[in-house]
Image: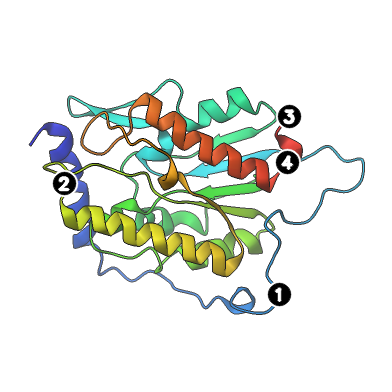
Amino acid sequence: MNLASASLLTLSLALAACSGDESRQDELGPLAGGAQPSLTGAPAPSGAAPDCSVVLYGDSILNGAYADHGRFRRHARNPAAELKARRPAWRIDDRTTPGQSLATLAKTFRTDARAARVVVIGSGIAEGWAGETVMRNLPWMVQTVRYEGRIPVLTGYSRQLPNAFMTPDKMAGRDRVDDEVDDLADDLNVAFADIGAAAPVALYDDVHPTAEYSLRLSDKLIATLDQVAPECSH
C-alpha cells in the first residue's frame, strides 16, 4: 500500500472510531412535508444587482486535491478556480478541506459564520467508506442553511476504481451515500450536483481525480449553479 492509501485508510478508520459520537439531530419540521422551498430561493428585488456569492464546503474532491508522496497537493484548475474562471460573476468563499468528513464539518456548521447566498455541501464520501450514513447530519444542515435564508446545494460523490484501498465494501459505501444524498435532495427540493455521473473516471492516486476528471466534476457543479442562479452564469 502506498503512502496515499495509508493516509486515507487512517482517515477512514478514525471516522469509524468516532462514529459513536452523538451529533445533534433536529426534526425536519416544516421541511418534512407540505409546500417545499424553491430551488432558487426568493427572487432578487427588481433592479437589484444579483447576489452571486457562494460558499463551498467539501473534502479533497471538491477541493481539487490529490495525494502525492504522502502530501495533499491541489490541481491548478480545481473546482473553485474553474468556477471563477468560467463564471466570473461568482464571489467564492472556498472552505473545502482535504480529509474532511461530514461529521467533522457538522461539529462547527451551526456556528460557522456565513454571508453567501448559496451554500454548497460536498462532504460525506468518508462516511460511505466507513460504513456510516450521511443522514445523521445532512438533513439538519440543509435546514440550517434555509433557516439562514440561503440556498443549499448538495453534491454527489466522485467515483473510484477498484484497487488495494478501494475495496468492494468502500465502493458500495460510496454508492450508498450517493443515493442517500440524491434522495434527500429530491425529498427537500434541493439542487443536486450529480458529480458521480461525470465520466470517464480517471484517478491520480487510489481515490482522487486526475486534473481532467476533476474538470468533469466541476462541469456538473457549474451546471447546477447555473440552474440555481442563472443570473450569475454570464
* Quadrant into which the N terminus falls: top left
Q: Which residue is mark 3?
A: 234
For this orientation, the residue located farthest to the left is: 1
Q: Earlier in the sequence, mark 2 or mark 1?
A: 2
Q: Earlier in the sequence, mark 2 or mark 3?
A: 2
Mark 2 and mark 4: Cα distance apart in space: 40 Å
Check disc 2 and give the amino acid type: Leu
Check disc 3 and give the amino acid type: His
Q: Position of residue 2 (x, y in %)?
A: 10, 32
Check disc 1 and give the amino acid type: Ala
Q: Which residue is mark 2?
A: 9
Mark 1 closeness class: few <14, some 14–19, many ≥20 residues within 10 Å: few
Q: Earlier in the sequence, mark 1 or mark 3?
A: 1
In front of the other: 2 or 147: 2
The quarter holding residue 144 reads bottom right
Mark 2 and mark 1: Cα distance apart in space: 43 Å
Q: Secondary structure at mark 4?
A: helix
Check disc 4 and give the amino acid type: Pro
In front of the other: 215 or 120: 215
Q: Which residue is mark 4?
A: 230
Q: Which residue is mark 1?
A: 35
For this orientation, the residue located farthest to the right is: 47
Q: Earlier in the sequence, mark 2 or mark 4?
A: 2
